[in-house]
Amino acid sequence: MRFPTLRTPAGPVPVTAPAWNPQRPGAMPSHRYRPAHERVHVPALMRRWPGRRIGHAPLWVPVDLRDGNQALAEPMDPARKQRMFDLLLAMGFKEIEVGYPSASRTDFDFVRQLATVPGAVPEDVTVVVFTAARADLIDRTFEAVEGLPRVVVHLYTATAPLWREVVLGRDRHELRALITEAATHLARRADGRPGVRFQFSPEVFNLTEPDYVLEVCNGLTELWDASPDRPVVHNLPATVEIATPNVYADQIEYLHRHLERRESVILSVHPHNDRGTGVACAELAVLAGAQRVEGCLFGNGERTGNVDLVTLALNLHTQGVDPMLDFSDLDEIRRTVEHCNRLPVHERHPYAGDLVHTAFSGTHQDAIKKGFAHHAKVAAESGVPAREAPWSVPYLPIDPADLGRDYEAVIRVNSQSGKGGIAYLLQTGHGLELPRRLQIEFSRVVQEATDDSGREVTAEELYGLFRAEYLDAAPDRPWQAGDDWAEVDGRRGEGAGPLDAVADALRVDILHFSEHAVGAGAGAGSDAVAYVEARVGGQVVWGAGRDGSVLTAGVRAVLSAVGRAQRE
């Protein structure tokens, strides 16, 4: 067997199965799990959400600096937290959860910085801070937010039966008393501070009895004396996804229709992505009455992550609804998030991945090419610029230019290989493994060469183009380097390693670095090839270097980027 660790389903085909479905029962222990309808009862109601559509954006609340940050193997340092906060402001977020100040010294110090540095928080932006239902933690939280003119203090407690029994050891009445006691203390600490509002999250809401959630939330609405001009936030998390999105929508609609003082309550949701349906849960929840959505950029978070606010917002954009956020340079947003989280965004991630606006299929490429031509023709006939004309191009649900991108095919179908293209030929012919974004950039060079000649290029010609554009672009500059220093052309630099020090000496920022050995099959001995994406004088450019030394290859790649920036 090719896969001896797998147990191919071999049970008898069910007698009720149609002839076209030969699937067989397997050995997976599915009997160990209870379906959602047995774990939590959702009262029957005449659903209204299926007939609705989303006509405006909810209030987006990014939790990257708290929920996303706590899920990182290496949490953000202060500089990364500030960079993320600045990005969120630039994108247009007006309510931002910034940390858990009672649980982390770094978070406490960051909140104090926001509170004490003049202009750190714009006048129309509200900061949210997170705290557990304990008096000492609440006190510490209020120490952190002292001086902030607008703040939401976010109180949370797990309420689902399993958590009550196994984690907290309290019954419904005892847990309600604990929440009420903490909420009362919260109200006392906020007395005389009109800029403080309250939020409550019954953690694992989607596994909690709806009547119990109503009992707790309505009690807090009354205790906190919610009013339209000082509303409370009731945030209903799908902390662990356990059902299809329509079940979550039913739960949200039930609360939406039964919460007391509804005009004084902001109904919020916080879906996770354990079943891969976080985006669908959020969208259906908005249809069901949610007014506010918490999530993270590109879906970072515990386990499989929080709901992705980028996808949610751009889904609205593609429906003609203003997301009230800016994504006009999505690549810069992605680079910043990757830097802050130290995690990559997947190449197939909706809207933002390196491959989402590319086509490997010749038929797709042909349809898109014709679609662009048709779009330009319709725009011209209508007398409007193509960038302002209604968008309708096959295989592209969004105009890449809206996101600061152009459509570029990462590879071209090669008539000789039948399955080749740029990346395929460079890898198989010369052992080069270009990063995806470099493939996109280099494809423009290849496109110009093939368009000028009117023919496809061979593998050798392709490598010649790559060598001329990147490997030979490095200016001949004397350099030397140590463990944490470097000198280039007499200019000294310092860094965490020799390559960082070279970049410091050249006054460039390295955004991406990768390297690999060239395989023996490529006839290149033991050379190393390095690739660098760098910001040089405001430009983002790629460079590449090749040498028997890994360090020298990396330095050549940085110099290549500098040389190409000067050339352009």
Image (cartoon, grey):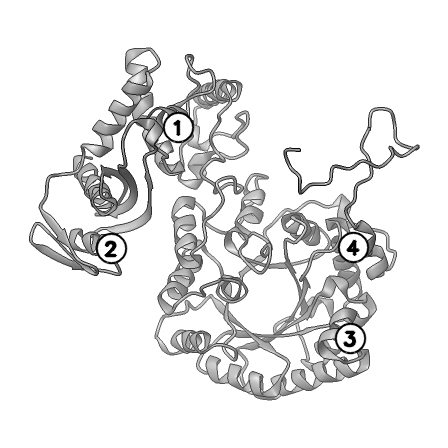
Residue 369 in the image, given as x and y percentages of width and height: 46, 20
Q: Which mark is nearer the camera, 4 or 1?
A: 1
Above-or-below relation of 548 to 448: below
SS category of the residue bearing label 2: helix
Q: Mark 3 Cα within 10 Å, few/some/many (few <14, many 20+)?
A: few
Reading the image, the residue beneath label 2 is 500
Residue at x 28% of width, y 38% of height: 529
Q: Residues within 10 Å of mark 2 (few under 14, many from 20)?
A: many
Q: Identify which amino acid the numbered label 4 is placed on.
A: Asp
Given the image, on which type of amino acid does mark 3 rest?
Glu
Above or below 454: residue 239: below
Q: Residue furthest left?
A: 490
Gap between marks 4 and 1 measured at Cα? 48 Å
Q: Residues within 10 Å of mark 4 (few under 14, many from 20)?
A: many
Q: Report the residue marked by disc 3.
A: 165
Relative to residue 479, is residue 557 drawn left or right?
Answer: right
The residue to which callout 4 is attached is: 250
Alpha carbons under labels 4 and 2: distance apart: 53 Å
Instruction: Give the residue furthest to the top.
Output: 454
Q: Which residue is mark 1?
A: 423
Amino acid carrying mark 1 in the image:
Ala
Is any part of residue 42 visible from this angle?
no
444 displayed left or right of 203: left
The quarter of the image holding the N terminus is top right
* Quadrant in the picture for the C terminus: top left
Disc 1 element: helix
Q: In the figure, residue 206 lies in which quadrant? A: bottom right
